[in-house]
Image (cartoon, rainbow, N blue to C red):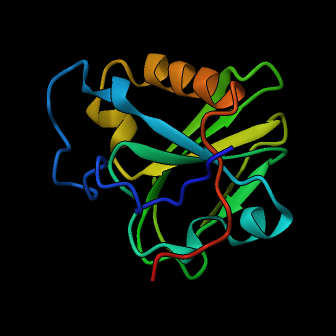
Amino acid sequence: MKTATIGADPKFPIHGHAAHQGPRAAGRLRLHRADTYWARLLGLHAYRRLPWHAGLYLAPCKAVHTMGLRYAIDVVFLDRHRRVIRRRDSLPPWRWAACLRAASVVELPAGYCAAYADWKQALELALHRLSLGQQSLNAQPDN
């Protein structure tokens, strides 16, 4: 299976460059799964910026932090059926968020959920593609 690193795909613009392209633009969301212990531990900390239509899926996970992260993120907590149970918009650096009922978490660029009315549908589609094994993430920073 081909693996990808966040920021390495030229099809994904850097955060903010293509932020508001209409109500259906969120459908291009692409999630990467941290599929090793080190990738989950490192999370988004290896990346200077998160591309606008990209996110990181962490499972199992009930809490995330942005200690040492240089940018804010949107955090979406999911139950064991991958249904949204909590959303935290623009979690700033040096903060944490938790949800005891969560089974997994999706980290997205700050403002992504608020920018699109269809963010939930885009997330469901991206999670479906992820369950088919189409995207994974190895802990390889893109210095």
Quadrant showing the C terminus: bottom left
Q: Position of residue 41 (x, y in %)?
A: 77, 69
Q: Nearer the viewer, residue 140 or 53?
A: 140
The residue positioned 69% from the left and 59% from the top of the image is 64
Residue 103: name its quadrant: top right
Q: Is residue 97 above or below residue 66?
A: above
Q: Is residue 17 above or below residue 23?
A: below
**How far from the left and from the top, in percent, is residue 134?**
61, 34
Marks counted in the figure total 0
Instruction: Identify the residue at image location x=62%, y=20%.
Output: 128
Q: Where is residue 39 in the image (x, y as percent from the top left)?
A: 73, 65
Residue 98 in view (yes/no): yes
Which residue corresponds to the image point at 43% horizontal and 63% vertical from the top-left?
A: 72
Residue in front for this viewpoint, 77 or 137: 137
Visible in this render: residue 89?
Answer: no
Residue 137 placement, left or right of 122: right
Nearer to us in this view, 66 or 53: 53
Q: In which quarter of the image is residue 130?
A: top right
Please state, as top left, top right, bottom left or bottom right, where the N terminus lies in the image: top right
Task: Left or right? Give the position of 108 relative to 24.
Answer: right
Please give left or right for residue 4 compared with residue 12 in the image. Answer: right
Is 82 positioned to the left or the right of 120 in the image?
Answer: right
Q: In this view, does 118 lie above or below 56?
A: above
Residue 16 at x, y percent in the picture: 21, 54
Closer to the camera in the image, 5 or 115: 5
Q: Looking at the image, which residue sits at the far front?
A: 1
